Image (cartoon, rainbow, N blue to C red):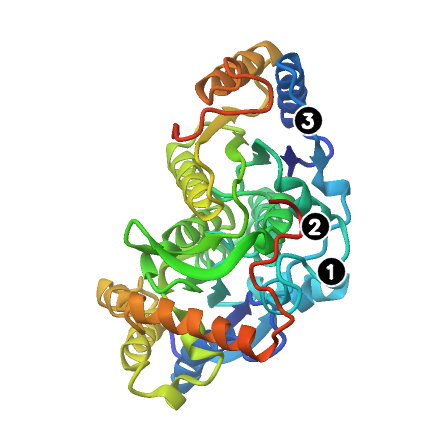
């Protein structure tokens, strides 16, 4: 679980707690990264992770450890304040460093160019964003971005949702439970997801 | 907009050299310089490295009549460096607007001055994928940023297969970049007139530099060459798992 929340963001902190409680209740192991306090450098755009040390970033910091943690995970959860319709810079910093997990080789997927997977399997993707007031335009951009990321990160299943900043924890809990059920987490065996389903709000 | 304004180029590429983003942005600001604009270029990676650099960035934004943000696409959206810079700019502009609202004005001229100081924002996104539509979400993010930062959204152009330019000046590949230059010329003219980027510019930029299948083959050939040259290199290495 990668959180790009600010240190005083009580809503995303509550969502993270709900997710941990619900997932651990279904015998999942949760590895949480609070990215604002992680040591992650900006991606330098050098592509050494494809050309020089394939599969590995040459910058040895938490960005590299997040990329390592992704492989072998069943589910990647992204938490973020919706920032201009996208992710916060803290979350984006970690996501930019995931490039080594993808192959440099290009292929066509549904008529579009993408990179081939480097690994045999990738986690499903769940993204939850917060907004202070509802904004369908921003929400649409956020949901579209998550769907695009799911293609490029080879997620078999994905879901995205935007919730109100400041919503009571009971409401957040219901939302989290509903999303996890939608993704099959609440009904599947521990640590496995029903691959092939695609859900987006 | 009158002749002789100020145009600010924000370069979002983290690359120190041979940046396609820098080349595309510089082309537009050069056209505006031809129209009498004073141009300034800010490398966002450098700006974020120091408090002084960040302060200079924010002051440059406030002083601009037109802003050109030129950036590569990273993971379907803007690179983290650009996102951070945009967060800071939006926070700064919001605080500035609030102070402005709370400050009493004596004259109509003061009010008019405030109302006419919204810079125009043009976004240029270049992609490692050949299909320009894959930059659409990044341009949407730029549009939302403009609204949050009290800027006038002039529009955006997405260039597919920007990697084919290898950061070289556009006139070095004159034939390949003819439609790119035409699109940028139209965008620059629109900015100079204080108008949104015309659909014709969007359509021109959307034309592929190279056909997608050819682009994929050329990219893969480059990696095959690299693998042949460095036999010890396993480009398909899986250091983190099966």
Q: Residue furthest top?
A: A170
The residue nearer to you, when weighing A193 against B36, is A193
Which residue was labeled with disc 1?
A59
Which residue was labeled with disc 2?
A63
Quarter of the image holding residue A134? top left
Q: Position of residue A170 (x, y in %)?
A: 59, 9
Q: CA distance from mark 1 to mark 2?
A: 8 Å
Residue located 64% across and 21% down the image:
A28
Residue located 67% across and 29% down the image:
A9
Disc 3 secondary structure class: loop
Is residue B56 visible in the rendered structure shown here?
no
Disc 1 secondary structure class: loop
Q: Position of residue B182 (x, y in %)?
A: 28, 78
Residue located 28% across and 54% down the image:
A111
Q: Earlier in the sequence, mark 1 or mark 3?
A: 3
Disc 2 secondary structure class: helix
> Are both tags, 1 and 3, on one chain?
yes
Q: CA distance from mark 1 to mark 3?
A: 25 Å
Which residue was labeled with disc 3?
A30
């Amino acid at each position: 679980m990668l959180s790009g929340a600010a240190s005083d963001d009580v809503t995303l902190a509550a969502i993270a707690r709900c997710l941990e409680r619900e997932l651990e209740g279904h015998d999942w192991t949760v590895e949480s990264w609070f990215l604002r306090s992680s040591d992650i450098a900006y991606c330098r755009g050098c592509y050494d992770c494809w050309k020089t040390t394939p599969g590995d970033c040459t910058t040895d910091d938490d960005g590299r450890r997040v990329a390592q943690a992704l492989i072998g995970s069943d589910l990647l959860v992204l938490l973020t304040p919706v920032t201009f319709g996208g992710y916060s810079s803290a979350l984006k910093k970690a996501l930019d460093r995931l490039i080594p997990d993808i192959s440099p080789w290009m292929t066509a997927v549904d008529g579009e160019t993408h990179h081939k997977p480097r690994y045999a399997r990738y986690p499903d993707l769940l993204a939850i964003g917060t907004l202070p007031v509802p904004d369908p335009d921003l929400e649409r951009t956020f949901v579209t971005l998550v769907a695009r990321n799911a293609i490029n990160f080879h997620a078999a299943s994905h879901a995205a949702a935007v919730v109100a900043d400041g919503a009571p924890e009971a409401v957040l809990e219901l939302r989290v439970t509903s999303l996890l059920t939608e993704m099959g987490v609440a009904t599947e065996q521990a640590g496995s997801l029903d691959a092939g389903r695609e859900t987006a709000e | 907009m009158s002749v002789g304004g100020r145009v600010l180029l924000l370069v979002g590429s983290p690359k120190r050299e041979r940046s396609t983003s820098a080349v595309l942005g510089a082309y537009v600001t050069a056209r505006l310089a031809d129209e009498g604009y004073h141009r300034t270029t800010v490398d966002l990676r450098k700006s974020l490295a120091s408090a002084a650099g960040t302060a200079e960035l924010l002051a440059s934004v406030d002083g601009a009549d037109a802003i050109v943000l030129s950036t590569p696409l990273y993971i379907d959206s803007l690179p983290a460096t650009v996102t951070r810079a945009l967060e800071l700019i939006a926070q700064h502009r919001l605080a500035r607007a609030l102070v402005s609202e709370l400050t009493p004005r004596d004259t109509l001229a003061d009010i008019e001055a405030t109302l006419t100081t919204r810079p125009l924002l043009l976004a240029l996104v270049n992609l490692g994928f050949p299909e320009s539509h894959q930059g659409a979400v990044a341009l949407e993010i730029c549009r939302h940023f403009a609204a949050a930062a009290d800027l006038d959204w002039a529009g955006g152009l997405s260039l597919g297969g920007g990697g084919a330019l290898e950061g070289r000046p556009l006139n070095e590949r004159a034939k390949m970049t003819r439609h790119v230059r035409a699109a940028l010329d139209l965008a620059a003219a629109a900015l100079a007139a204080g108008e949104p980027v015309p659909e014709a510019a969007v359509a021109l930029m959307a034309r592929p530099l190279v056909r997608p299948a050819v682009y994929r083959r050329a990219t893969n050939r480059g990696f095959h060459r690299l693998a042949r040259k460095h036999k010890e290199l396993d480009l398909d290495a899986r250091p983190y798992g099966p």
